[in-house]
Image: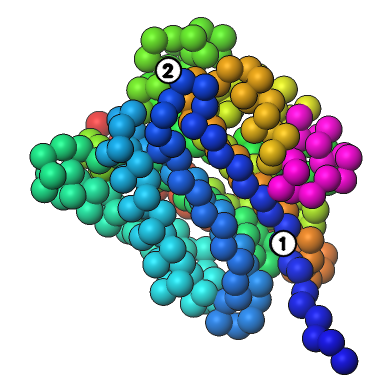
Amino acid sequence: MKPTIAVHFQYGSATHTGWFRTINEDRSLLRVGQTVKGVPYAAAALADGMGGSEDGAQASELAIRRLKEWLDAKVPALLSAGDSLARLEREAEAWFFTVHQELVATGRGSGGRLGTTLTLLLLTDAVYFIAHVGDCRVYRLTPAGRCKRLTRDHTWVSAQVRRGRMSVRRARSHPKRNVLLHSLGMGERPDVYIRSGYYALGTLFLLSSDGFHDRFLPGSIAALLRAANGKGSDLQEMCDLLLTKALQRKSDDNISVVLLKPVTGRKNAKERLRLHCGLWLRRIYRSGRKLLSSLSSG
């Protein structure tokens, strides 16, 4: 009798230097494993190095290498803890700052500066968790076809749009559209964006670097995902298609896309209700903590 292997997640990835770059500073990661309790999980990450040189590639490579080490050493146990989301949030924020410090020290040691964005997506047991710094993005396409961006760009123009000082159309062509307010290795302690929520089986997650999503309006990205997902193509074929679409629009930056889809799960209705309540409480707690922090600093 041949052994069978359960496939819990489908995935794919694609990257390209873009039309006018000779160095690809993007680095990605895809990892599928099990928690210490044997529950399947998947991790996807994208790092976009800064600087337009080998320094950017070195920074993103270091961040992804350290992420692999952290996933192996910490995450299987963290995802099995009773207060897994709270612990995961604390550990992720601390880990992001540790990598930030290492990049700062490495840059000083070489007489330069090393900077990168980093976006991490974890999926396990019907819960997604995102830790994010920079301007890579995570999109979610539900089985019903609803598409939503789950991350917030840490760019100067995005901050202006959120404050009502600039239109989305103006932000897309503004000279400062690529200026980052938060990154790893540059500036002060980065503000790590944390988000968690529930996903249904068959939900499609897209991670993309700005070389991809800057070529499209939000509605266009949603339409691309719906069309590709509706054809039943495997996720690697979908990644190749998305990359081709960005190249057709003459992207002038590195292009990277990663797709991840959960295809098995075990949550029942009662467990989903409990999970939703816990996630909302976590969001309220995070919002209150940030509000207190802003009031105290002001």
Residue 122: x and y, percent?
57, 58
Query: Label 2 neighbourhood size at 10 Å, few (<14), some (14-19), many (20+)?
Result: some
Q: Which residue is drawn at 79% across and 66% down?
A: 264
Which quadrant of the view contains residue 16?
Answer: top right
Q: Mark 2 points at which residue?
A: 177
Residue 160's mark? none
Identify which residue, 118 or 65, lies in the foreground: 65
User: What's the residue type where badge 2 is placed?
Assistant: Arg
Residue 134: x and y, percent?
41, 36
71 is higher (above) or lower (below) than 77: above
Q: Name the residue under label 1.
A: 9
Q: Is mark 2 on a helix, strand or loop?
A: loop
Q: How many labels does the image show?
A: 2
Identify which residue, 19 or 211, lies in the foreground: 19
* Residue 229 part of the magenta segment: yes
Point out the stretch of residues depicted in magenta.
224-238
Visible residue check, residue 216: no
Query: Label 1 neighbourhood size at 10 Å, few (<14), some (14-19), many (20+)?
Result: some
* Residue 276 part of the magenta segment: no
